[in-house]
Amino acid sequence: MRILLTTTIVFLFIQTAFSQEKMEHFRGGMLLHAGYLSNNAYPTKINGLCTGIGGKMVFPVWRGVRIGGEGYVSNYTYKESNGFYKLGWGGLLIEYQFSKKRVSPVLGVTFGGGKVSDLFPVSGNYADNEPDVAIFKVYSSFIIAPQVSVEYSLNSHMNLVAKVDYLFYPGIDYPSFVASGPRLSIGFLFSR
């Protein structure tokens, strides 16, 4: 991993040094998201709106191909209790920007990992300091997140971005516990 990262950084510097035109060095920013999560677990069934925040940073490497990283946190609150489902994830992002016009479509995929914290109160009085009965699960997983986004150039260093992604959990031992679904992210990306 260290050799791959070093090789990528050296390649970026060499490409920039011998480039005839002014080249973008990086692009990154923060995005807010909302989406729909669902799973098939009982009694910790999830079926509804999630919200969260995250960000990404990518480096152009070759003719529209960008490589970098991204990470997000998605939160869901159980409607019938004071519980929550929280997914924090991130990983290696590979993107392809189809054009460098004012409106530019981008196709990408993230390979990474995530951690779920799931608290579901079963019974008790949550207003007092007495012990209550709850289900609390914490587990991690490999994640693949394909995505499609559109970037709108506001000026030479700032873009407005809208992105749709979907989380997949390949090879997980407990597929009914994890919640997946589409999410829409909106934010700003800054470049240099």
Image: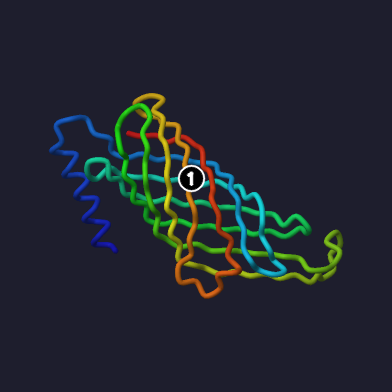
In the rendered structure, the answer to whether residue 181 lies left or right of residue 150 reads: right
Q: Three-letter amino acid code at disc 1?
A: Val
Residue located 42% across and 53% down the image: 146
Name the residue furthest front.
40
- Residue 31 appears at what percent x and percent y? 50, 41
Residue located 38% across and 53% down the image: 109
- Residue 56 appears at what percent x and percent y? 42, 46
- Residue 189 appears at what percent x and percent y? 42, 36
Corner quadrant of residue 63:
top left
- Secondary structure type for disc 1: strand
The colour scheme used here is rainbow
Q: Check the image and report above or below for 63 versus 44.
A: above
Q: Which residue is mark 1?
A: 164
Residue located 38% across and 45% down the image: 57
Name the residue furthest bottom.
173
In the rendered structure, the answer to whether residue 17 lies left or right of residue 119 reads: left
Residue located 48% across and 45% down the image: 164
Count of numbered labels shown in the rendering = 1
Mark 1 crowdedness (10 Å alpha carbons): few <14, some 14-19, many ≥20: some
In the rendered structure, the answer to whether residue 192 lies left or right of residue 13 reads: right
Corner quadrant of residue 87:
bottom right
Image quarter (top left, top right, bottom left or bottom right) of the C terminus: top left
Name the residue furthest top.
155
- Residue 120 appears at what percent x and percent y? 72, 65
Image quarter (top left, top right, bottom left or bottom right) of the N terminus: bottom left
